[in-house]
Image (cartoon, helix red, strand yellow):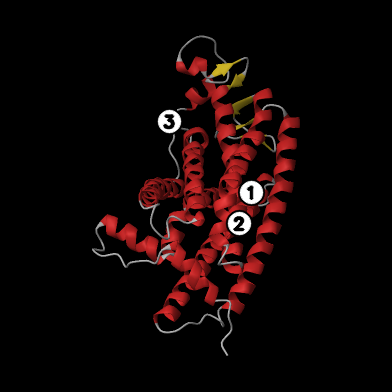
Amino acid sequence: MRGPSPFYACLFAFSAFSFIFYIFVLFIIAKNRKIAPFNSSFFTLTLSLGIIDCIVIINSYATVKFAGWGWIPDFYLSTNNANGSTFREIMAANGSSRLALVSQVLAWGPAAAQYVSVLLTAINRLTAVYTPLRHETIWAKWLTPALVIQYCYSIITIIPMFTTNFSYFYPNVSGVIKDVLAVDFNDQTYRAAYYSYSSVWSVLIIVSVSTLYGFTFVKAFKNSRSVQGNGSTENQNQKNFSLEVRLAIYGCVCFITLILYNVFLVLMLFRFSSLANPAWNVASDLLAVQSPYFLLAFSSTTREIVFKAIGWKKKVTPVSSIVLTQNAAGNSTRRPN
């Protein structure tokens, strides 16, 4: 049994730690979901994305990367053909690996949900900056339908997969049989259809989200000159406005990782460079585990409450309620005399 190279071993160690840390941060947010700002629509979307990201990282290693590293290759290959009642036999039927099917279903389905999540976050940040008074009112009405659409779209994406076959195999690259396992569609027509569809979808999402963040930051720049109030109200207005903008920056940074992921995916699929594969692996892992790090970097409230749970901070700075945030935001649209 081979093991990963030092590079991939380090990447795995980082991703394993990040996965545990991610679950911890999600638990803290969920535990405090009834207090501001964690009772907002933004953090509900964050929790939803967190569940999806955790599924992605588990599936990525358990059914793809471990196989590619040469860990128990006989097990993965044995799921291609078997008849009987043992686990590996149950996971195979008629030349199609059910384990490979699970691998691809949990790759494509959550990936589709990730893209929708990035779009929803961008829309959420746009409404927070453009219509601060009505922001939470709008999302109170549309948050549940938006999440339903997100997960329904993910399910629709994977339904055709149950009509075709998948398997583990040693890929043939330019006439050379590689000694690392891969998992993919058996039917190249299905494969071409899925990759073509995902290419169009990715471009549409990237263009849409880029436009949304462009409008958001232009509006945020204009509003930054008009945040005002009297005494403590002014300070509160500035803090509320700053929080919304910082969360928008968080969303945009995560979106940039998605762009890099797609760039390296294209380079890897078309074999433009030997560095494309390791670069894609890094981008793939970062896309799944980046959220808690950037959230702590751009949200001081999240940082404080997580550090308090760890024991690094004894006292958490009180935060205003969501109602105060909405009321104070009303003043942020008025220009000084």
Quadrant of the image containing the C terminus: bottom right
**Left/right of residue 61 with respect to residue 126 in the rendered view:** left
Q: Mark 1 and mark 3: span between their CA atoms?
A: 28 Å
Query: Circle 2 sits on which residue?
Result: 260
Mark 1 or 3: the one toward you: 1
Indicate which disc, 2 or 3, sits on the residue closer to the N terminus. 3
**Residue 95 can be seen in this image:** yes
Q: Is residue 294 above or below residue 275?
A: below
Q: Amino acid at mark 2?
A: Leu
Q: Front-most of 70 and 264?
A: 264
Element at badge 1? helix
Q: Position of residue 192 (x, y in %)?
A: 74, 36
Q: Front-most of 328 and 57?
A: 328
* Mark identifier at residue 265: 1
Q: Amino acid at mark 3?
A: Met
Q: Is residue 270 above or below residue 228?
A: above
Query: Circle 3 sits on which residue?
Result: 1
Q: Amino acid at mark 1?
A: Leu
Q: Is residue 266 above or below residue 93?
A: below
Q: Quadrant of residue 320?
A: bottom left
Indicate which disc, 2 or 1, sits on the residue closer to the N terminus. 2
Asked if disc 1 and disc 3 are in contact, CB closer than 8 Å, the reply is no
Identified at 65% across, 25% down, the residue is 162
Identified at 60% across, 63% down, the residue is 127
Residue count near mark 2 (Cα–Cα under 10 Å), binned few <14, some 14–19, many ≥20? some
